Image: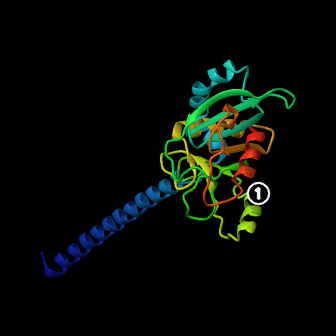
Amino acid sequence: MTMDTALRKFGIYALILAIMLTSLIAALRLWRDNRVSSRVLEKKPRTNETVAAQVGSKVWNGVGDELNAAGFETYPPFLRILAFKESRKVEIYGRTVESESWRWIKQYDFTAFSGKLGPKLKQGDLQIPEGIYQIEYLNPNSRYHLSAKISYPNEFDRKMAQKDGRTNLGGDIFIHGKAVTIGCIPIGDRAIEELYLLLMHAHHHPIPCIIAPRDFRAGHTFPKIEEIDWEAELYASIAEAL
């Protein structure tokens, strides 16, 4: 074999090797891009509809019997939420028409607690608010699985803050999953799935959410809150709403 022949063969082998390496690199890039695309699809934001599709059957299996026992054939169109900080309970009531009495559906336990009895006064005080609120919206992409936004601060909160000369009242108060809080109401993942579907299927809005230090329906006295002088006014309005 002459030198020229050997060089030609070497060149052919080198070209074939280069083509194979190029193809391998292209295949690896395609595999990587597909993996990235898959991860992007996995992280696609959820919607209420996708939440319902993912957990709807499980939720109905969990709460359906309780709804039936309360006299509901399906999710009630009217809902009301009561939360009591001292007992750390969230009670859910429903009705089918506005003229009928509220019917007790079930209750959930707080899975964590922060602060103490008394209203929320400022950002960062770790207090769970106390007052008469509404559910503003549902968040299917919460860091705490699922969540429902509470309308803190309300008009009364802002009025008392102006009276006291307070600013920076804080916000972003939710009922949510998991077992951690710095001022929200966590009830765990399974419970928030049930409550989320109940809220999602309620047709009549706004949905009231009353947060009380304790259940004044049972004759409990109003707690004394040292930081303020208007707790009696607040608790009288909560007691009347309850």
Mark 1 residue element: helix
Task: Relative to 156, say whether 14 is above or below.
Answer: below
The type of residue carrying mark 1 is Phe
Give the side of residue 234 with respect to residue 51, left or right.
Answer: right
Count of marks overlaid on the render = 1
Residue 71 visible in image: yes
* Residue 190, horizontal then vertical, whole percent: 53, 36
Q: Which image quadrant for residue 225?
A: bottom right
Q: Quadrant of the N terminus?
A: bottom left
Q: Residues within 10 Å of mark 1 (few under 14, many from 20)?
A: few
Residue plotted at (26% across, 72% down): 12
Q: Position of residue 213 (x, y in %)?
A: 62, 45
Residue at point 66% right, 65% down? 169
Which quarter of the figure is the C terminus placed in? top right
Is 30 positioned to the left or the right of 139 in the image?
Answer: left
Would you name the residue on which mark 1 appears?
Answer: 156
Most foreground residue, 185 or 212? 212
On screen, residue 51 above or below 106? below
Q: What's the residue at 78%, 33% (across, down)?
A: 77
What's the residue at 60%, 29% (across, down)?
57
